[in-house]
Image (spheres, grey):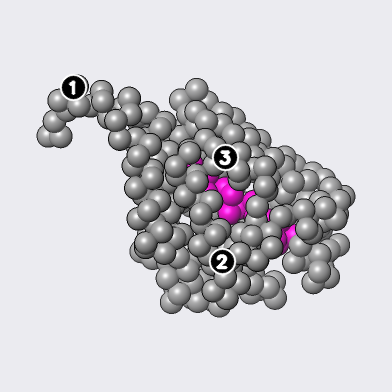
């Protein structure tokens, strides 16, 4: 089904207006959004996802773990340390399930994406890549991951990629599917695709251009340039540098502390903030303004607003 940009983004307006109902729209339709020329194509992942799911299932290993905390912060862990947290086929399927869980978590405010055992993610599992190296399967796998990562980025949660160690290939792409990137002083993000005779396919190039601009994206992709924390901050890819400590827990603590400054307060307000930023990021101005008005309507006169008015809050 080919739809115009306007029609696709009317879904975002529905999200803005009805909040929670947006989640059921997103998840029940399992909509994939693909940009083609000036149109947006909204297609069901099931068009091609059925058979690629079967193929992905044939490459098991590792897991994608999700912990949801009462504080409203969740942690996703890419867990396949024997392969530097490369994505096996089953992990791709599990990521989709975890994103679905977060889409339906109405108490959520933030999510951290990290790798297990001191490194982030080395991209797709090269064993699976070799087995599905024909263009048709490659494109289906890409579509599947693009859809999942687009859904991750569009969660009504503030998301952070916590890069400790290496984020390579698809792992580098995954970092761009979060709102923020934190990196330990010994971390590296590298789009190694060119060295593999590839370009990003999980949506990483499109998102990268939005984050660092086309000049920097060309440098990172055409040069397969290693991004260390200093360079990352300079080009706007990295938001904060964390201490490189031994022990995963410590890095996660630092990440949680950093994120907590942005998710303090009632979930309705935090989720509304994410929605207005998301519509500003993805919609043409007129539609973004409409979406913003609709989101505003969900918090104006709401409990947090009334409480602040009653307390005569001063912003000193
Ligand atoms: C659209 C998606 C495009 C993509 O993601 S393509 C994949 C891009 N990624 C890569 O090419 C990563 C290749 N791996 C490497 O460069 C190095 O292994 C890496 C990550 C720098 C780590 O180097 P070292 O610290 O020296 O460790 P190592 O090489 O001994 O690796 C430890 C074990 O992990 C394995 N591994 C690492 N990355 C993998 C991957 N992507 N798929 C499958 N296995 C992978 C590696 O083979 C090794 O296993 P083993 O101990 O030899 O059995």
Q: Position of residue 166 (x, y in %)?
A: 58, 54
Q: In the rendered image, which quarter is residue 97 located in?
A: top right
Q: Main secondary structure of the magenta part?
A: helix
- For the residues bearing labels 3 and 1, Cβ distance under 8 angstroms: no
As for residue 151 lying within the magenta part, the answer is yes
Whichever of labels 1 and 2 marks the residue nearer the N terminus, that label is 2
Q: Of helix, strand and loop, which one carries label 3?
A: helix
**Residue visible at 29% across and 30% down in the picture:** 301
Q: Nearer the viewer, mark 3 or mark 2?
A: 2
Instruction: State the residue position of label 3.
Output: 23
Q: Quadrant of the N terminus?
A: bottom right
**Residue visible at 59% across and 49% down in the picture:** 151
Q: Position of residue 139 (x, y in %)?
A: 74, 66
Q: Is residue 15 left or right of residue 150?
A: left
Q: Is residue 179 left or right of residue 170?
A: left
Q: Quadrant of the C terminus?
A: top left
Note whether residue 214 is visible.
yes
* Chain part drawn in magenta: 141-159
């Amino acid at each position: 089904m080919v739809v115009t940009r306007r029609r696709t983004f009317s879904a975002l307006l529905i999200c803005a207006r009805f909040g929670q109902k947006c989640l059921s729209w997103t998840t029940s339709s399992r909509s994939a959004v693909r940009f083609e020329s000036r149109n947006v194509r909204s297609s069901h992942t099931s068009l091609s996802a059925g058979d690629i799911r079967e193929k992905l299932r044939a490459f098991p290993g590792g897991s994608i773990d999700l912990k949801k905390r009462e504080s409203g912060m969740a942690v996703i862990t890419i867990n396949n340390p024997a392969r530097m947290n490369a994505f096996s086929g089953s992990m791709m399927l599990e990521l989709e399930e975890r994103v679905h869980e977060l889409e339906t978590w109405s108490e959520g405010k933030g999510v951290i994406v990290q790798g297990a055992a001191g490194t982030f993610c080395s991209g797709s599992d090269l064993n699976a890549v070799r087995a599905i190296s024909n263009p048709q399967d490659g494109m289906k796998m890409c579509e599947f991951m693009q859809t999942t990562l687009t859904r991750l980025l569009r969660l009504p949660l503030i998301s952070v990629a916590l890069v400790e160690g290496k984020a390579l290939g698809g792992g580098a792409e995954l970092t761009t599917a979060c709102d923020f990137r934190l990196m330990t002083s010994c971390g590296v993000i590298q789009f190694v695709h060119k060295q593999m005779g590839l370009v990003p396919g999980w949506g990483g190039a499109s998102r990268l251009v939005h984050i660092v601009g086309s000049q920097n994206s060309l440098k990172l992709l055409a040069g397969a340039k290693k991004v260390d924390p200093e360079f990352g901050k300079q080009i706007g890819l990295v938001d904060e540098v964390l201490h490189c400590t031994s022990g995963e827990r410590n890095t996660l603590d630092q990440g949680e502390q950093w994120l907590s400054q942005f998710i303090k307060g009632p979930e309705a307000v935090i989720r509304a903030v994410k929605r207005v930023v998301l519509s500003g990021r993805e919609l043409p101005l007129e539609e973004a303004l409409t979406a913003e008005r609709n989101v505003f309507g969900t918090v104006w006169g709401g409990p947090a607003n009334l409480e602040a008015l009653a307390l005569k809050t001063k912003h000193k």
